[in-house]
Amino acid sequence: KKRYYKGVYTSPTTSDKLQWTKIGELPEESAYGVSLQYKSSLIIAGGMNEQGVHKKVGILTPSKDDCTIKELPPLPCTLDNAAGAVSGDRIYIIGGNIDGKPSPKLFTMDMRKPSLGWNERSPYPGRGRVQPVCAATDNALYIWGGFTPADSTAEATVYCDGAKYDFSTDTWSTLPAVTDENGT
């Protein structure tokens, strides 16, 4: 039977060998959420456990021997197996399963004004992707890979291509698959 955990662990990065120390616990067991570094904290969004998928979001701030977790506004939907990135003070969450179905939706929250909650932006082109990877620069968000399970309209698909989201225009452009020096 699958198990979920709520322990929070840390290890000093000053050694070649990691020595983990438990410094706290999440409010509940969780897996398959999005974890993003924001300044000296971690944003933890969505996820699932034995009770199902949730939309909770929190900010975890570690100290040497413990951590604090503060609730942030919840996502507008349940979310698991998504990706995310941070650009400046803005958090981006994209793809994954939204309310149980693969989705191309993009959500953003300004950490300078978290009380305003999450805003939905233009979805990326194509079918929803589960477990994509994501990165951000100062002016764009990138998404690659992931997969879409089969449904009544299409076969299962594994993706090697990507897409670029322009922050200033709220538009997407497609990107080719990543290749090696031989074009493979």
Image (cartoon, rainbow, N blue to C red):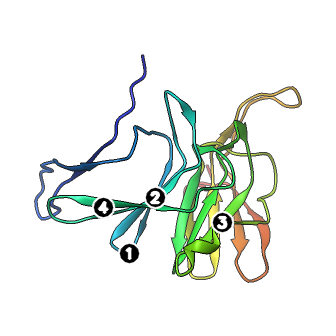
Determine whether the residue tagged by mark 4 lies in a helix, strand or loop. strand
Mark 1 → mark 3, Cα distance in angstroms: 19 Å
The image quarter containing residue 151 is top right
Point out the tag, 4 or 3, that comes first from the N-terminus.
4
Asked whether, in this view, residue 136 is left or right of residue 3, the answer is right
Q: Report the residue marked by disc 3.
A: 118
Determine whether label 3 and label 2 are within 8 Å by CB: no
Q: Position of residue 24 (x, y in %)?
A: 24, 50
Residue at the location (35% across, 35% down)?
5
Determine whether label 4 and label 1 are within 8 Å by CB: no
Point out the tag, 2 or 4, that comes first from the N-terminus.
2
Residue at the location (81% across, 50% down)?
126
The image quarter containing residue 115 is bottom right
Q: Residues within 10 Å of mark 2 (few under 14, many from 20)?
A: many
Q: Report the residue marked by disc 1.
A: 39
Q: Residues within 10 Å of mark 4 (few under 14, many from 20)?
A: some
Point out the tag, 3 or 2, that comes first from the N-terminus.
2
- Give, as a three-letter code, the residue at label 1: Lys
Q: Is residue 60 above or below residue 8?
A: below
- Give, as a three-letter code, the residue at label 3: Trp
Q: Report the residue marked by disc 2.
A: 58
Foreground residue, 26 or 129?
A: 26
